[in-house]
Amino acid sequence: MLTALEHVQIPVKQMDRAITWYTEQLGFQLSSRDGDCIAFLTLPEGPILMLWQTNDEMTNAQFTVNGTEFPTMLYRTTQIHELYNKLTNLGAQIQVYQDDGFAWVLKFYDSEGNLWGVLQFNQQDEN
């Protein structure tokens, strides 16, 4: 019945700051915008990222399991070490940066307090 994931929606506290973060730091493109309320961002592959400005303090795009926060979205990259260095230089809060065997895993908080995950899959030995 379902054929694709169309878009994901996340809350942001300051629309201009969030758009700058996603476009300049992570490589998203601003597709369209409705004032300070809504913005649509895209990557070369995958669903649209829809930003919603909110003043609700307890709203973020993550959940907890036994007190540990987990991101609701994980992206793929082939440059995880470069991304880690860039985020570190920006002063972004890093939650996880490690090789989990199947992939390098990077989890970090954006400018709005949302937790993101990024994977770089490790090459499998063919032996």
Image (cartoon, helix red, strand yellow):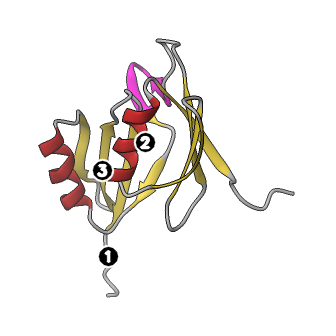
Badge 2 amino acid: Ile
Q: How crowded is mark 1: few (under 14 residues within 10 Å), some or many (20 or more)?
A: few
The residue singled out by tag 3 in the image is 25
Determine the CA span between mark 1 and mark 3: 26 Å
Q: Residue at x 23, y 33 (%)?
A: 93
Mark 3 or mark 1, which is nearer the start of the sequence? Answer: 3
The residue singled out by tag 2 in the image is 19
Quadrant, the N terminus: bottom right
The residue singled out by tag 1 in the image is 123
Q: Nearer the viewer, residue 120 or 47?
A: 47
Q: Quadrant of residue 50?
A: top right
Determine the CA span between mark 2 and mark 3: 10 Å
SS for dot 3 = helix
Was residue 64 drawn as part of the magenta stretch in this picture? yes
Q: Nearer the viewer, mark 2 or mark 1?
A: 2
Was residue 13 drawn as part of the magenta stretch in this picture? no
Q: Which residue is drawn at 39% across and 19% down?
A: 67
Q: Residues within 10 Å of mark 2 (few under 14, many from 20)?
A: many
Badge 3 amino acid: Gln
- Work out whether 79 lies above or below 18: below
Determine the CA span between mark 2 and mark 1: 33 Å
Task: Please indicate whether residue 88 sits to the left or right of residue 124 in the image.
Answer: left
SS for dot 1 = loop
Whole-percent x and y of residue 127? 32, 87
Task: Please indicate whether residue 106 sits to the left or right of residue 76 in the image.
Answer: left
